[in-house]
Image (cartoon, grey):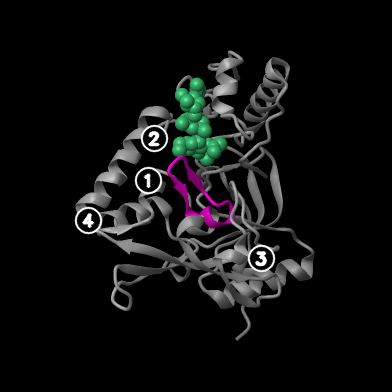
Amino acid sequence: MSVACDQLIQHDVPLAERTWFKLGGTAQNFCAPKDIEELRAALKWAADSGATIRVLGGGANLLVRDGSVDGLVLSLERPGFCHIEIDDASEMDVAHVRVGAGVDLMTLSRDCSHRGLAGLECLAGIPGTIGGAIAMNAGGRFGCIGDVVERVRLIDTKGVIVDCDAQVMQFGYRRSSLGGRLVIGAVLKLRQEAAADVKKRFQDNWRFKKESQPLAAHSAGCVFKNPEGHSAGQLIDAAGLKGFGRGKARVSEVHGNFIVADEGACASEVLDVIEHVRGAVESHCGIKLDTEIAIW
Ligand code: EPU
């Protein structure tokens, strides 16, 4: 059945509330498909109109510029992409968790840990959706999502669905190989352990994150990638940049790799802080930092 695109695609949709920074402009074209058929129709609309496709995950690692974002912004937030099915009966001590791309990672890692399904507790407190987490191999000091991915379901821009084994995804430091396709779901392989043990590890990891990062402020998490052998936060701190600000955006006093934005901040202020930090760190130690966050 064909899907009417005039109802499917919305125009000038504000994105600020959909990001953790809580700032930025609008999407010229926006679609939150309810199922695969609507997603295929949206992809076809984008192909026919030559629109670049951008997928909005949890908006946790994203800075949206102040104006209008062109192309098509897709969000897999509706129930058709947010299923969670746990199979903990067919293999000893293992649980296969089939999830949609729109599932919230923080909720999933907490719920699995509380049920004694181990493997996601290393991601305690990391925001975002499963789709976004897989696309950038989200993680931290204790591990990354690629470590527990068994298979990923992808859709290409023509609407063809393929299932890829984890090896094909080439998970690396904050990267994976999607080959221009979109993540629509995944199967995670977790271990069954005593619930109290997994829950304790989850809580310890969560506490560590809360103590070392400004989680209550509006930010996009770590802004820069860690250069090999260094911590970007430490380099920014050593360059004396904590607290450096422009307008309502500033380098966090808690963790140097976070830029926090007060209410009323605009994206250009965050971008100014990013460029100042990049230049000042390079002058201080000769290392040029690359951004980890997506900038639309
Ligand atoms: N440090 C400082 N000053 C700072 C920040 C850090 O001296 O302002 C020092 C710390 O004391 C520590 C070292 O730098 O000795 C490393 O810091 P941390 O443990 O906070 O880790 P990180 O390398 O800065 C990475 C990830 C984080 C993740 C943490 C913890 C990157 C770019 N960042 O940070 O991920 O939460 O490990 O697992 O890989 C994110 O991706 O958004 C993110 C926050």
Front: mark 2 or 4: 4
Q: Nearer the viewer, residue 134 or 227?
A: 227
Identity, as a three-letter code, of the amino acid under mark 1: Ala
Identity, as a three-letter code, of the amino acid under mark 3: Arg
| Residue indicated by mark 3 | 181
* Secondary structure under the numbered disc 1 in the rendered image: loop
Q: Residues within 10 Å of mark 4 (few under 14, many from 20)?
A: some
**Residues under labels 2 and 4: Cα distance?**
21 Å
* Secondary structure under the numbered disc 3 in the rendered image: loop
Q: Residue furthest bottom?
A: 1
**Residues under labels 3 and 2: Cα distance?**
32 Å
Query: What label does residue 124 carry, if any?
Result: 1
Which image quadrant for residue 115?
A: bottom left
First along the sequence among labels 2 and 4: 4
Q: Is residue 107 left or right of residue 221?
A: left
Q: Nearer the viewer, residue 146 or 41?
A: 146
Tell me, yes or no, whether the two marked residues, 2 and 1, touch with CB atoms within 8 Å. Answer: yes
Looking at the rendered image, the quarter that the N terminus falls into is bottom right
First along the sequence among labels 2 and 1: 1
Q: Is residue 138 left or right of residue 159?
A: left
Q: Residue at x 58, y 78 (%)?
A: 37
Residue 84, image x, y percentages: 38, 68
Residue 290, image x, y percentages: 68, 35
